[in-house]
Amino acid sequence: MKVFQKLDDFLDFAWVQISRGKVDKKSPARHPTFVTSSVDGLPNARTLVMRRSDRKNNQIEFHTDTASSKMLALEKNPRAGIHIWLPKVQLQIQMDVFVEVKVGDITIPYWKNVPTNSRVSYGTIPSPGNVLENPFAYDHAPDQKRFAVLVCDIQSIQLLLLGVKHIRAYYKKTTNWQGEWLSP
Ligand SMILES: Cc1cc2nc3c(=O)[nH]c(=O)nc-3n(C[C@H](O)[C@H](O)[C@H](O)COP(=O)(O)O)c2cc1C
């Protein structure tokens, strides 16, 4: 088990794990849980693929279908939670983010980088979440206009490392990621 005496070292370690989400298909950081507040106030959690992480700018990026319910939720409340559990290193990462939703022509450069076989995720007919007569009563109609990029500006990061003695820390953007230890 890793032992961290310094807050900065602990945060560095977490960012190494987050960054693996993009490059290592086997890393659990590739599939964070993305949590929004729905219009009726209830939390709504789902798995998304992490498309990019950028420590320098404190950002994480996801892609989604503009017709999915998370879009309406983000329109009402652009804050979201992100959760990652990394069993191999026994680390839980929780983030609080502001989500900038990009749609329309601004997404064309992103769309060009989406592999053709992945584009089917953006444009399902009927829209995601609609009731079907049977499980396969839907079509794929890949459409750049149904493609959204969710740029998440990280506001805080909370880490919990399990071990003989657990350690927990909280970092926020407003204090320039200085961090503080928390009781686990
Ligand atoms: C492993 C996995 C990866 C997924 N990746 C994405 C993704 O990158 N983007 C996305 O919109 N949905 C993705 N989904 C589907 C979402 O979890 C969710 O079902 C869908 O986006 C509809 O969510 P909503 O109705 O809450 O908006 C993924 C699901 C799984 C199981």
Image (cartoon, rainbow, N blue to C red):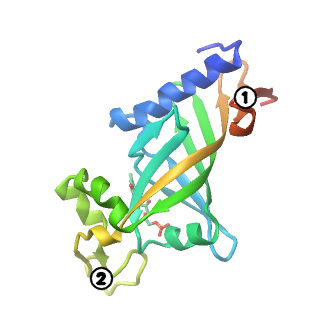
Ligand 1 located in image quadrant: bottom left
Q: Residues within 10 Å of mark 2 (few under 14, many from 20)?
A: few
Tell me residue 36's x, y (percent).
Answer: 60, 62
Residue 168: image tag? 1
Quarter occupied by the N terminus:
top right
- In the current view of this chain or complex, which residue is farthest to the right? 183
Determine if residue 88 is in view. no
**Labels 2 and 1: the sequence-earlier one:** 2
77 left or right, relative to 101: right
Q: Amino acid at mark 1?
A: Arg
Q: Is residue 92 above or below residue 122?
A: above
From the image, which quarter does the C terminus lie in? top right
Q: Residue at x 45, y 48 (%)?
A: 61
Instruction: Identify the residue position indicated by label 2 in the image.
Output: 134
Question: Is the residue indicated by label 1 positioned so its CB lies within 8 Å of ligand 1?
Answer: no
Left or right side of 73 for 32: left
Task: Pick the residue in front: 11 or 40.
Answer: 11
Name which residue lies at 64% across and 75% down: 39
Residue lying at the far bottom of the rendered structure: 133
Q: Is residue 135 left or right of residue 174?
A: left
Element carrying mark 2: loop
Residue lying farthest to the front in this orientation: 105
Residue 177 lies in quadrant: top right
Answer left or right for 142 relative to 14: left
Residue 124 found in image quarter? bottom left
Residue type, label 2 = Asn
**Looking at the image, residue 12 lies above or below residue 145:** above
Residue 85: percent from left, percent from top: 54, 38
Q: Could you classify mark 1 by the number of other residues whose Cα lies within 10 Å: few (under 14), some (14-19), or many (20 or more)?
A: some
115 versus 124 height, above or below: above
Q: Secondary structure at mark 1?
A: strand
Q: CA distance from mark 2 to mark 1?
A: 47 Å
